[in-house]
Amino acid sequence: MHVVIVGCGRVGSSLALSLVTEGWSVAVVDDRAESFYLLGEDFGGQFVEGKALDWDVLRSAGIEHADAVVTATDGDNTNIVVAQVAMKKFGVKCVVARVYDPLRATLFAQTGIRTVCPTRDARVLLLDAVRSCEVSAEA
């Protein structure tokens, strides 16, 4: 199984390391070569330096035979556009985009792009944590 991960920050790099450990073929795309240090010297995947909005960069990462694409940059617009390109232009079946804006995450999820929204997810987790404090205080 081959996955292209766009964005080599804390999330993208840790995802790449996990998937390589599980036996996936992994290509990580980032426009800043210094970001690849997070993967370590022994990373068993591919580094692709360049703008993920450039189709030639995506092709260099193997998007044409990718089983999955994950967009995990710090920009919603980049994540959404690359996810749409992966799905519509390259026919990737499993596309997952990190989208910080909850409204946009919902909208793009309706188009078939799987979205992960840290803003929405953190809100739910924090709300649960606060509610559990209330229960603990009553006990």
Image (spheres, rainbow, N blue to C red):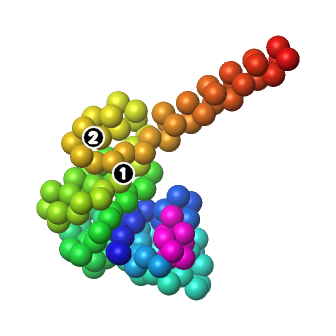
Dot 2: element: helix
| Residue at the disc numbered 2 | 108
Q: CA distance from mark 2 to mark 1?
A: 9 Å
- Relative side of 91 to 121, left or right: left
Q: Residue at x 63, y 27 (%)?
A: 128
Q: Is residue 28 above or below residue 103?
A: below
**Type of the residue with mark 1:** Ala
Q: Residue 39: where, in percent of width, then height?
A: 56, 74
Image quarter (top left, top right, bottom left or bottom right) of the N terminus: bottom left
- Point out the stretch of residues depicted in magenta: 15-22
Residue 45, located in which quarter of the rendered image?
A: bottom left
Near-viewer residue (77 or 87): 87
Query: Position of 75 compared to 57: left or right?
Result: right
Specify whether residue 16 is painted magenta. yes
Q: Amino acid at mark 2?
A: Phe
Where does residue 113 sit, x and y in percent of width and height?
A: 28, 48
Q: Which residue is mark 1?
A: 97
Residue 121 in the image: x percent, y percent?
Answer: 52, 37
Up/down of 39 relative to 74, above or below: below
User: Are there few (<14), some (14-19), or many (20+) residues within 10 Å of tag 1?
Assistant: many
Q: Residue at x 42, y 45 (%)?
A: 116
Identified at 68% across, 21% down, the residue is 131
Taken as a whole, is the magenta stretch helix, strand or loop?
helix
